[in-house]
């Protein structure tokens, strides 16, 4: 028995020694998640791709089998690896680049849509000059021209460049004027037509504004009231500066323009159109609505003729940053917050509400299909649109609900009580 016990002990010892030796001779299998370095790039093996597929039975999922993100290849300089580049810094507070880019995309989509149905349809933006440049998200003092955006529009319209930016008839501050000039010149450099509306009733100021705008190559007019109240043309000059008998084929040919935002005071739509035919502006800008109804095709066609014989362009205005309860698209069930993309009322215009302009629901109303606002304007025969409410909208959302401090004048200087406007006086025959 003692001999048998010794033999058993020796066999156990031999077995214990043989196991590690056998394990040392066995070739290790490739572990899941193994990475192969090929050509300086980290490439995952097929086992990684298999491990990344989550099994149907999630209860059997072994988190240890899912490989971590493979390291990026390192760049070496003189044999030493360089550190990975840091992620870009967040956008500085108060500068919402995305909102402005969303507005650019919206305007570009309007341009693309309109030219699908009218090849020469013109798109001019009122305000929003800052969209002409793209600011660096880190260093605000650096910018580059927004070339793609500028190629999608035909012109820009700015207000109060020389007179009436804050106070009607008063000279605009040097700081504001300088800012507007720099941005407008960028647009002009890239082929955009620059239109300017100053505000004054003083003859010397009107002539000064015209001469200064002309020297810059801008087309200008000086309004005798805020744009929202314009129901007649300026009394001075009696005939527009740079009046021309030539027909106007495109925005680039325009040398004069007139604004009428309230045509209802002229009476019926056909009467309004005939009164406008007594003027010689190269471009007429009007509201598509004449009272509660839109202008008809015959009236729009009549608007296209000057008194002195040539044809001109006729544009309609559209607010793309706010929804108004008096517009055709407004539904009786709509109110602030319902639908949820309708936001606060616009200051001094409680029947208009800011909208989340990047929402597809709103963009379809403006230019989504053949039932949209822009399509209706094209169908009526208009030559282009003035897109309004741009800067107010993106600044409203950037400021968390506060509008831009620097506003266009909302009231003219005190004047005699206004009577029902008479039809514009017929200009003298051309000399």
Image: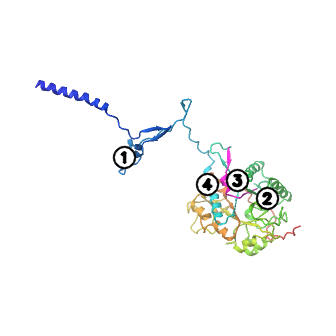
Q: What residue would you read off at disc 3?
A: 129
Disc 4 from disc 2: Cα separation: 29 Å
Give whichever of discs 3 and 4 has the lower sequence position. Answer: 4
Q: Secondary structure at mark 2?
A: strand
Give whichever of discs 2 and 3 has the lower sequence position. Answer: 3
- Quadrant assignment, res 103: bottom right
Can residue 361 be seen at all in this image of the molecule? yes
Give whichever of discs 1 and 3 has the lower sequence position. Answer: 1
Q: Residue furthest front?
A: 39
Give whichever of discs 4 and 1 has the lower sequence position. Answer: 1
The residue that appears at 68% across and 47% down in the rendered structure is 144
Q: What residue would you read off at disc 2?
A: 220
Q: What residue would you read off at disc 4?
A: 102
Q: Secondary structure at mark 3?
A: helix
In-image side of 116 versus 43 (left or right): right
Disc 2 from disc 3: Cα separation: 16 Å
Q: What residue would you read off at disc 1?
A: 61
The residue that appears at 26% across and 31% down in the rendered structure is 19
Asked if disc 1 and disc 2 are in contact, CB closer than 8 Å, the reply is: no
Q: Depth check: 173 or 279 in front?
A: 279
Disc 1 from disc 3: Cα separation: 55 Å
Q: Secondary structure at mark 1?
A: loop
């Amino acid at each position: 028995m003692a001999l048998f016990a010794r033999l058993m002990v020796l066999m156990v010892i031999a077995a214990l020694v043989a196991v590690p030796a056998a394990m040392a001779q066995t070739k290790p299998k490739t572990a899941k998640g193994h990475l192969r370095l090929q050509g300086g790039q980290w490439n995952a093996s097929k086992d990684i791709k298999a491990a990344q597929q989550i099994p149907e039975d999630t209860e059997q999922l072994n988190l240890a089998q899912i490989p971590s993100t493979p390291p990026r290849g390192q760049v070496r300089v003189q044999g030493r690896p360089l550190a990975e580049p840091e992620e870009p810094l967040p956008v500085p507070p108060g500068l919402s680049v995305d909102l402005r880019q969303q507005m650019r995309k919206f305007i570009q989509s309007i341009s693309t849509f309109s030219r699908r149905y009218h090849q020469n349809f013109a798109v001019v933006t009122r305000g929003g000059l800052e969209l002409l440049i793209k600011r660096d998200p880190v260093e605000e003092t650096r910018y580059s021209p927004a070339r793609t955006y500028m190629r999608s529009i035909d012109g820009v319209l700015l207000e109060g460049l020389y007179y009436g930016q804050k106070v009607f008839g008063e000279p605009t501050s040097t700081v504001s004027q300088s800012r507007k000039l720099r941005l407008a010149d960028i647009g002009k450099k890239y082929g955009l037509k620059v239109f300017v509306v100053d505000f004054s009733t003083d003859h010397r100021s009107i002539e000064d504004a015209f001469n200064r705008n002309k020297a810059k190559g801008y087309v200008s007019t000086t309004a005798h009231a805020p744009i929202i109240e314009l129901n007649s043309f300026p009394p001075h000059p009696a005939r527009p500066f740079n009046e021309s008998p030539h027909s106007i084929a495109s925005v680039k040919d325009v040398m004069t323009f007139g604004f009428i935002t309230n045509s209802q005071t002229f009476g019926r739509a056909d009467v309004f159109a005939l009164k406008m035919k007594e003027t010689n502006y190269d471009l007429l800008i009007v509201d598509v609505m004449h009272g509660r109804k839109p202008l008809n095709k015959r009236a729009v066609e009549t608007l296209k003729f000057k008194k002195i014989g040539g044809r001109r362009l006729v544009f309609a205005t559209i607010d793309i940053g706010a929804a108004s309860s008096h517009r055709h698209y407004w539904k009786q069930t709509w109110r602030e917050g319902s639908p949820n993309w309708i936001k606060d009322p616009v200051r001094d215009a409680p029947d208009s509400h800011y909208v989340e302009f990047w929402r597809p629901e709103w963009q379809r109303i403006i230019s989504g299909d053949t039932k949209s606002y822009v399509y209706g304007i094209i169908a009526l025969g208009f030559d282009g649109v003035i897109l309004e409410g741009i800067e107010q909208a993106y600044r409203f959302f950037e400021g968390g609900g506060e509008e831009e401090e620097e506003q266009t004048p909302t009231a003219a200087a005190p004047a005699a009580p206004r009577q029902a406007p008479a039809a514009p006086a017929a200009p003298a025959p051309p000399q």
